[in-house]
Amino acid sequence: MSNEKIVEYLQRALKMELSAAHQYQLHAHTLDDWGLTKLAAQMREEMTEELGHSDMFIERLMFLKAAPDMGFDATPKKAETLPAMFKADLADEEEAIDYYTKAAQHAAEIGDIGTRTLFEKIVLDEEGHKSWLELQLDLIERLGEKTYSSKLVSFGHDEDD
């Protein structure tokens, strides 16, 4: 069922998801530092989802009797502005969508339905992330960064702030 190319796709996908999870973790801390605690909480949710994706890739690699490589595809980088943060994440999501689509197509060609289905499921999640990021960039453009940011600050423990 599996071949070296499938394992290669899965190994890089695992590294991409680990990189994404830790990038979102860094974003969460950066946003907390900027006082944008509501957006920081969203980034922590994204981090958890990316870790879930990495779990699925690990599980598939082990099913295929391959040893998961737990490295990073790219080193997380601290953003200097919200637009820069969202644009970098958008580029990463687009790269993942393209890569996972190719991986799913290859898996389909060799009859590996399990791997194909896994990549297709995660592509759909990544498309959701892409859509959310595009919306945030559109909102910043329409509202301005200050107005956009003002809705993401919390003042204490009251969520209605």
Image: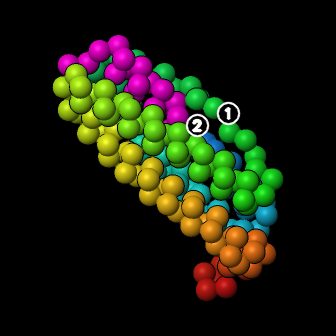
Q: Is residue 90 left or right of residue 52?
A: right
Q: Is residue 47 left or right of residue 104?
A: right
Q: Position of residue 69 (x, y in %)?
A: 48, 21
Q: Is there a contact, CB below 8 Å, between mark 1 and mark 2? A: yes
Which residue corresponds to the image point at 31% horizontal and 26% vertical from the top-left?
Answer: 106
Which residue corresponds to the image point at 74% horizontal and 79% vertical from the top-left?
Answer: 147
**Is 119 within the magenta?**
no
Q: Earlier in the sequence, mark 1 or mark 2?
A: 2
Tally of numbered discs: 2
Q: Position of residue 7 (x, y in %)?
A: 37, 20
Q: Quadrant of the C terminus?
A: bottom right
Identity of the amino acid at label 2? Ser
Decide: few, some or many residues near mark 1? Use Cα within 10 Å; few <14, some 14-19, many ≥20.
few
Q: Position of residue 82 (x, y in %)?
A: 73, 60
| 136 to 11, vertically: above or below | below
| Residue 59 seen | no
Which residue corresponds to the image point at 41% horizontal and 36% vertical from the top-left?
Answer: 100
Q: Position of residue 22 (x, y in %)?
A: 61, 42
Mark 1 lies on residue:
75
CA–CA distance in space, label 1 to label 2: 7 Å
The residue closer to the viewer here, 114 or 91, is 91
| 95 to 159, vertically: above or below | above
Identity of the amino acid at label 1? Thr
**Is 9 within the magenta?**
yes
Q: Which mark is residue 19?
A: 2
Look at the image and name its color scheme: rainbow
Q: Secondary structure at mark 1?
A: loop
